[in-house]
Image (cartoon, rainbow, N blue to C red):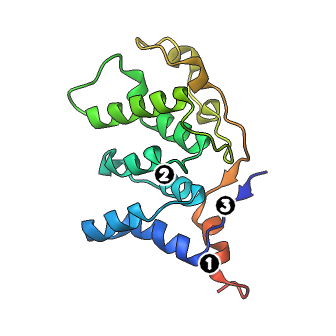
């Protein structure tokens, strides 16, 4: 059973602003304010990939980024399946390669959130036979707890004791 990842009211407000603020300057400021592993994980879990890879750069470059968060983003990029930087979507490929480099170098030291790439489904025989070999370490589950990052879970504490 997954543990609910609960954010406090201020944390929730920062994550929501970083995801949904209309004003780009305000959204960027909110993103820069995400510092806790829980905030980074919640942001990455709800990130809109139509916005490109730029917003996730902050997450993967943060020393507070959890190994599970980084691996989740890596597998969501699809950039790992190309053998070289594509002309279209190169920012996502660059993001994947940066995560891979940081992951393999030991940059990510926190292990609070479990992520197992095999839980994403798909045909692993096909995935592992791609032109660019995915490093073995990137195919293994990270230690930590499975967390529920649904908006209901994230908002639990923010509602207060009366559940409002």
Q: Which mark is residue 44?
A: 2
Relative to 23, is 69 above or below?
above
Q: Give the x, y percent position of residue 133.
A: 47, 13
Gap between marks 1 and 2 measured at Cα: 19 Å
Q: Which residue is mark 1?
A: 158
Q: Which mark is residue 85?
A: none
**Side of 38 relative to 33 (left or right):** right
Of callouts 2 and 3, which one flags the residue occurring earlier in the amino acid sequence? 3
**Side of 153 relative to 35 (left or right):** right
**Side of 97 relative to 145 (left or right):** left
Q: Give the x, y percent position of residue 8.
A: 61, 74
Assign a secondary structure to mark 1: helix
Q: Which mark is residue 5?
A: 3
Q: Quadrant of the C terminus?
A: bottom right
Crowding at mark 1 (Cα within 10 Å: few <14, some 14-19, many 20+): some
Q: Is residue 78 visible?
A: no
Of callouts 1 and 2, which one flags the residue occurring earlier in the amino acid sequence? 2
Relative to 137, is 75 above or below?
below
Q: Is residue 85 visible?
A: yes
Crowding at mark 3 (Cα within 10 Å: few <14, some 14-19, many 20+): many
Q: Give the x, y percent position of residue 56.
A: 40, 48
Is label 2 in contact with label 3 (beta carbons under 8 Å)?
Answer: no
Residue drawn at 39 percent across, 61 percent down: 32
Q: Give the x, y percent position of residue 1.
A: 79, 51
Q: How many marks?
A: 3
Relative to 144, is 75 above or below?
above
Residue drawn at 52 percent across, 47 percent down: 63
Assign a secondary structure to mark 3: loop
Image quarter of residue 29: bottom left
Of callouts 3 and 1, which one flags the residue occurring earlier in the amino acid sequence? 3
**Side of 138 relative to 160 (left or right):** left
- Residue extending farthest to the left is 87
């Amino acid at each position: 059973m997954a543990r609910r990842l609960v954010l406090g009211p201020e944390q929730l407000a920062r994550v929501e602003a970083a995801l949904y603020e209309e004003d780009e300057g305000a959204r960027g400021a909110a993103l820069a304010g995400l510092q806790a592993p829980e905030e980074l994980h919640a942001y990455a879990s709800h990130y809109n990939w139509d916005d490109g890879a730029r917003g996730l750069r902050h997450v993967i470059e943060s020393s507070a980024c959890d190994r599970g968060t980084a691996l989740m983003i890596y597998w969501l990029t699809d950039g790992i399946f190309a053998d070289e930087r594509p002309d279209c979507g190169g920012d996502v490929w660059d993001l994947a390669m940066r995560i891979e480099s940081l992951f393999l170098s030991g940059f990510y030291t926190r292990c609070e959130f479990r992520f197992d790439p095999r839980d994403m489904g798909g045909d692993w025989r096909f995935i592992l036979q791609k032109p660019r070999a995915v490093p073995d370490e990137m195919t293994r589950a990270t230690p930590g707890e499975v967390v529920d990052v649904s908006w209901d879970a994230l908002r639990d504490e923010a509602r207060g004791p009366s559940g409002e």
